[in-house]
Amino acid sequence: MIEPTESESKDELDRFCDAMIAIRAEIQAVVDGKVDPRDNVLKNAPHTAEEVTADAWSHPYSREQAAYPLPYLRDGKFWPPVARIDNPYGDRNPDLRVPADRGVRAGCRRSDRRGLRMKLETVEVV
């Protein structure tokens, strides 16, 4: 269930609903066997501007489908600077470097999926 905040306009909520409906349609296309389950627009999202505008395009779907999955994105597209991030790698190999102007030591708490807590005491200053 999604609980919108009072600060979101009806237009923004409509765009959110349109995005959820489009994602569900992309999932259904995989379920129905209409698209490759390993190389499809949903599996490879988000697509960066660099990827979409590169000379080489090896995906079975169009660049337009990758760049503009919904029509309203043509007017105000946010281009992500990176594609998909490997979250499990980041969880297992945290990079805790802090720029020198942010201080020498920092302590932080982090919860993992099992509810365990660990305290990270040292931070490398770069």
Image (cartoon, grey):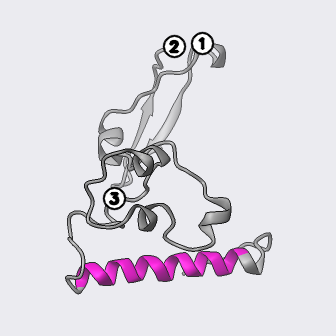
Gap between marks 3 and 1 measured at Cα: 36 Å
Please state the horizontal and vertical placement of residue 75, each as a whole percent of the image. Answer: 67, 64
Residue 44 image label: 3
Please state the horizontal and vertical placement of residue 16, each as a whole percent of the image. Answer: 60, 75
Question: Earlier along the polypeptide chain: callout 2 or callout 1?
Answer: 1
Dot 1 amino acid type: Ala
* Nearer to us in this view, 111 or 49: 49
* Nearer to us in this view, 21 or 111: 21
Q: Please state if 7 lies on the left or on the right of 32 as rendered.
A: right
- Dot 3, how many residues are within 10 Å of its Cα: few (below 14), some (14-19), or many (20+)? few
Q: Please state if 109 lies on the left or on the right of 84 as rendered.
A: right
Gap between marks 2 and 1 measured at Cα: 5 Å
- Dot 2, how many residues are within 10 Å of its Cα: few (below 14), some (14-19), or many (20+)? some
Extent of the magenta region: 12-31
Dot 3 amino acid type: Asn
Q: According to the image, label 2 marks what residue? A: 125
Q: According to the image, label 1 marks what residue? A: 100
Nearer the observer, disc 3 or disc 1?
3
Question: Earlier along the polypeptide chain: callout 3 or callout 2?
Answer: 3
Please state the horizontal and vertical placement of residue 101, each as a whole percent of the image. Answer: 65, 14
The stretch drawn in magenta includes residue 20:
yes
**Quarter of the view holding residue 14:** bottom right
Secondary structure under tag 3 reads: loop
Which quadrant is the N terminus positioned in? bottom right
Nearer the observer, disc 3 or disc 2?
3
Dot 2 amino acid type: Val
Residues at marks 2 and 1 touching, judged by CB atoms closer than 8 Å: yes
Question: Earlier along the polypeptide chain: callout 3 or callout 1?
Answer: 3
Secondary structure under tag 1 reads: helix
